Every structure is written in C-alpha cells, then in structure tokens.
Image (cartoon, rainbow, N blue to C red):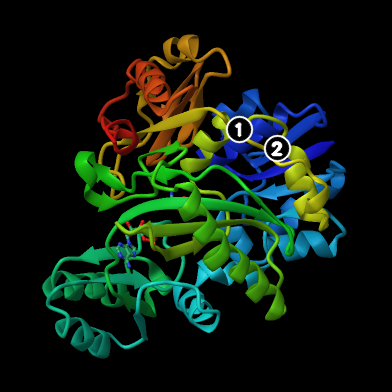
Amino acid sequence: MKVLVVGSGGREHALAWKIARSPLVSRVLATPGNAGMARDADCFPEVGASDADAVVALAKAENVDLVVIGPENPLADGLADRLREEGLAVFGPSAAAARLEGSKSWSKRFMARHGIPTAAFEVFDDLAAASAHVRERPGGCVVKADGLAAGKGVFVCGDSAAAVAALDEIMADRRFGEAGACVVIEDRLPGEEASYYAITDGTHVATLAPAQDHKRALDGDRGENTGGMGAYCPAPVVTEAVEKQILETVVHPVIRGMAAEGHPYVGVLYAGLMIDADGAVNVVEFNVRFGDPETQALMLAMEGDFVPLLDNAARGTLDRAAPVGSRDAAVCVVIASGGYPRSFDKGLPIEGLDAAGGLANCDDAVVFHAGSRREGDGFATSGGRVVGVTARGATVREARDRAYAAADRISFANAHKRSDIASRAVDR
Ligand code: AMP
Ligand code: GLY
C-alpha cells in the first residue's frame, strides 16, 4: 500500500513513522512533511496541507491507496470531502463533521442536543454583551474563541478582570482573526484532564490508549496555554470505570448523533475530558484529529499494525480490523523555541540531534521533528515546537527517564522544555 500523510508537525512525523513500520505499506508520502520526516516518508514540501487541489493531484498522480489527514484546518476546509469525491480512501472527517472542533459554539450546542456532559455555557458575538456576562462571574470562567486558534484561543480566567482582558484580546484585538468573531463563555470544570481517542468509520469504534498532555508552557502547569509541551500514555486517571463512562456517555453518543444529523464521523474523535474527584466525566472540547504531542506517545506505545485500523475506518469496515493494544507506556518531551506560544526566533542551529539519535537509534526512543528545517548538514529551528523526544518503557517512569536522557542531549539558543512531563503519573 501507498499511504499519504497530510501535515508537517510532530504528530504527522509520528503517524508516518508508525505507518512506515506496517508490513502492508510499501511507501509513505507526506505533504508537505518536514525535513526531519524524510527518514520515514517521501516529502513533498511544495504541496501545502491546505492546498486541496495540489493534495488531490498528488494523491492521484502517485496512486495512493489511503490518505491520512493530520491537522484540523484542512479538515475544516473540506479536504476529506474533496479527496472522497475523487474516489480516494480518506482517514479524516468531512467539513460538516469537522465542525465538532472548528466551531466551539456548534460543538457545545451539539453536545447539548445529545445530552453529552459538558460545562454550562453561553455564546456571544457582541463584545459588550460578553463583557457584561463575565462581570457577573467574579469567581471566574473560561473564555474561548469560537473558531480554530491552534489550541491557543482558550483563556481560563480566575476573575472577571482576566475574562474581560481575554475578551478584548479575542474580540477587539482579533488576536486569532475571524476565529474571535464569536466566543463561548463557560463554567470552569474541576478535576484532572485526560484525552481519549476513538477511531471510527461512522458506526464502529476502536479505542486507543488514554493520554495526558501538558498544555501550559511552564513547569507546575503555570504560564500560557500552548499546543502541548509534552504528553504521556497511558493516563492512570482513566480507570476502567472511567473508560466505560467515556464510551457510554461521550464516544457512542457523538458517533450516533453525528450519523443521525446526517454527517457520519469518519476518522479519529479526540475527546478532551475533565475527570473530577468522583470519576465523573465532562467534555472540555472535541478535536477531529490526533492530538499533538499525544500522538507521538501513542504511536510509540502502540503494539501491532495501525494501518488496518486506519484503512478500514476510511472504508467503513472498521469491524474487520484487529484492535491494537499497548502494554507499554510512552512519554514525549517537547523542546520548544524560547518565547513560544508568542513570538520566538527562528533559524537557530540545533545541536545534539545525533547524540540524542544515538540514544534514540532503536524503536524505544525517537526524535520526532515538528518545527525544524535543514541547514547545511544539520537542522535549524523553524517553529514554536521544534522536536518531540519520545520514548517508551515498561512503565511511565522508565519511558520518562529515557525521553529526558535523550532530550537533554539536544540544545539550541533559548531552547525551552518542561522538566515535569509525566510527573502526574510518576508521582501518583
Ligand atoms: P480547549 O482548547 O477547549 O481544550 O481548552 C484548552 C485548555 O483550557 C484545556 O485543555 C483546559 O486545560 C482548559 N479548559 C478549557 N475549558 C475548560 C473548562 N470548562 N474548565 C476548566 N478548564 C478548561
Ligand atoms: N495536545 C493538544 C492538541 O493536540 O490539541
């Protein structure tokens, strides 16, 4: 089989790496891919993930058997629909189904329609009305830009002054562009977060290991929200009883609801969840794609062949695919550019990739590239999250120690990584 992976981040590198290990696969292509992915896939840097015409043309010219779409923006823009119209097998939801992530107001109203547990909310498209609403909430609330904002459009506010400032940034300054024309304001949920991944063909479901990421920039979950500074799996907060509840109250109702509303969901449903002290589950958000960096950990921990799952989900025959398990744990430590998630320098030479690669030369530890580019014989930084150093082990502790041993070899000017990735599981 020839498999095309669409996207260029650490998530896509991890997907390409895992797909390339399938005995069914003769070639992995990536568009645009990134310089560090070239080991695992033939990259087509001239074809952008959002250039639907070019992606369709490439998929047809190269006769690919399956397209796996990584990022949310092309999904929201209808790339999966375009590819399906051309008769290609696609892992990823239609634009209509991608509204689960693309519009937080649509997603919250969908949850309300189907009785899916989530924080109480209101939707506003008027700054004055939104500001008045948060002033009535002195204890704080969560303010979310409605549209896609690369995971950065959410502000958890401890008091109404912080919420008013967030509204100004989103609605008046338009830091996230048109994504901020409308906001969702919701109650803060107490508890511990986890993410849960269900692969679906629109009817059947296959589940992956539950994971946890670290969204805040700094140790101790301080600082701003980022795309994710590290991740690990499995997440011990998702006990068997919690998992049962997630499937019964979240995953199956979403898949039934999407089908009943006429836009069956095909791809991976990523449920961001809050689990309270009593084990009650609430949805924080849905994403319509794999999490990043969680996927880097999931791919390393996964035993068995992932490709039959992706391929059968794309073809509506997921019940024919063998489930994939993982007895192992895995941890991903992101090394980011200093200043991320705001402004940061690019083009800084990255040292130590070979040394880290020396530790990571087996399938127990891998350096996944995200924001790097080729410079001479080496690599330089080109993005906020530069690499994800990912390792597996029999326990989360073993995986974490391996990941940090490799990550500590890598350096560039102003490099920043958290030092407490996976501590919630290790210190439990
Ligand atoms: P989202 O992009 O919606 O996942 O939000 C980003 C992060 O903000 C989440 O991972 C949570 O840490 C936090 N968050 C979002 N909504 C809530 C909520 N209702 N209560 C508490 N924390 C939240
Ligand atoms: N790690 C969070 C996300 O992928 O949205």
SS category of the residue bearing label 1 = loop
The percent coordinates of residue 248 (x first, y second) are 57, 64
Image quarter (top left, top right, bottom left or bottom right) of the C terminus: top left
Q: Nearer the viewer, residue 347 or 193?
A: 193
Dot 2 beta carbon under 8 Å from ligand 2:
no
In the picture, measured across the screen, residue 278 lies left or right of residue 101, that is left
Which residue carries the number 2 mark?
306
Label 1: how many Cα within 10 Å (few below 14, some 14–19, many 20+)? many
Pinpoint residue 182: horizontal percent, then vertical percent.
39, 80
Q: Circles 1 and 2: CB distance less than 8 Å?
A: yes
Circle 1 residue: 302
In the rendered structure, which amino acid carries the disc numbered 2? Phe
Q: Alpha-carbon neighbours of circle 2 within 10 Å: few (<14), some, or many (≥20)?
A: many
Q: Residue at x 70, y 48 (%)?
A: 68
Query: Could you tell me the amino acid type at mark 1?
Result: Met
Q: Disc 2 on helix, strand or loop?
A: loop
Q: Residue at x 69, y 61 (%)?
A: 79
Please tell me which residue lies in front, 321 or 97: 321
